[in-house]
Amino acid sequence: MVNLEKKLKDSMAIKEIRDKFQAALPKNRDKFDEQDVQRILTDDWYVKRFLIARNRSPGEAFKMIMESLEWRKTQGFATLPANAFPQEFYFVNAMFDYEPDLEGNVTLHIRVRYVLRCGPLVAHAVKWASKFFYDLENRCQSSFFTILIDFSGCGIKNAEFDFVKHAVVVLKNYTPACVKRILIIDLPPILRLGYNFIKSWIPDNGRSILKFISRSQLTEYIDPSNLPDYLGGTCSRPYQGMKVVPEGCPTAVEYGLSCGIPLDQCVKIAKTYEPLVKEIGLYDLSSEADFAAKVESELKSRKEGKLNEADALKIAQAVIT
């Protein structure tokens, strides 16, 4: 009886929210992507997720929907291709979705030590992460997520809590009521303060989803056959390297130059990624000066129409137009 009453209240609240949305739509339609509009109008569970996220307050849920849909449209995610970002982001892949847990929830992995300080590209990395969540949420519309935050190999110098915060905030504000649990793996004692950071980003009534575990406890939540090798699993699905890089992605140098970032800063960005990507031969940075000279020489050759394709560094065409 209680469940029936709850379902009835939710149904009435969903109708109230949808009525408000339809009334506001004529003046706001150009602020939203049409696919998001149709989802609000036809998908009860999608609307209910906002209702749950706002403690079943129809007014607050409506406000959250308006803000979320406008954010999605403003970011341009619906038309932004995967290869609009540097291939290093994908090659390193500090964040990726993987095989389901024991309950069938999609797993989302965040490897904190792979979140690199990439200087002028930080804002671009944040947008890449937001686009990732947008695509994942669209692809797994009715699924819950289990988030695994892996701190192994982290110390004070490479613990990028800001990136983790962004991930949690985007999930909380723009993809509501989809996180089933957050598993924090192998948090070093020196980073225990990190718990206070993470806890502060989650509402009091949602902190029960936080669980601190070691690698040996992972099988309580995920079958070994669905875990990647870095967590002791046997799944062979790739999660790093060129196999997961979308076709046509520029290198970080190409991307940086196309965004107007000075050459010397682009070289520094590439140096940041070098330890992880030099094995695939994206570029040779044994000497910053030599590399910068090669890039400048290629740009000059392109402008003069004398480019030797055999020696090309594939600098983005956009930087010379």
Image: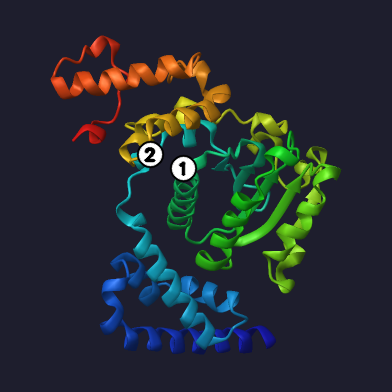
Q: Earlier in the sequence, mark 1 or mark 2?
A: 1
Label 1 and label 2: CA atoms lie apart by: 9 Å
Among the 4 quarters of the image, the one containing residue 200:
bottom right
Residue under the point 59% across and 47% down: 108
Q: Total label count?
A: 2
Percent position of residue 38, x then y: 33, 71
Q: Which mark is residue 261?
A: 2
Answer few, some or many: residues within 10 Å of disc 2's Cα (few below 14, many 20 plus, some between 14 and 19). Answer: some
Q: Nearer the viewer, residue 98 or 283?
A: 283
The answer to whether 214 is drawn above or below residue 34 in the figure is above
Among the 4 quarters of the image, the one containing residue 223:
top right
The answer to whether 214 is drawn above or below residue 287 in the figure is below
Q: Secondary structure at mark 1?
A: helix
Q: Secondary structure at mark 2?
A: loop
Residue at mark 1: 121
Percent position of residue 147, x then y: 64, 51
Three-letter amino acid code at the position of disc 1: Leu
Percent position of residue 314, x then y: 30, 23
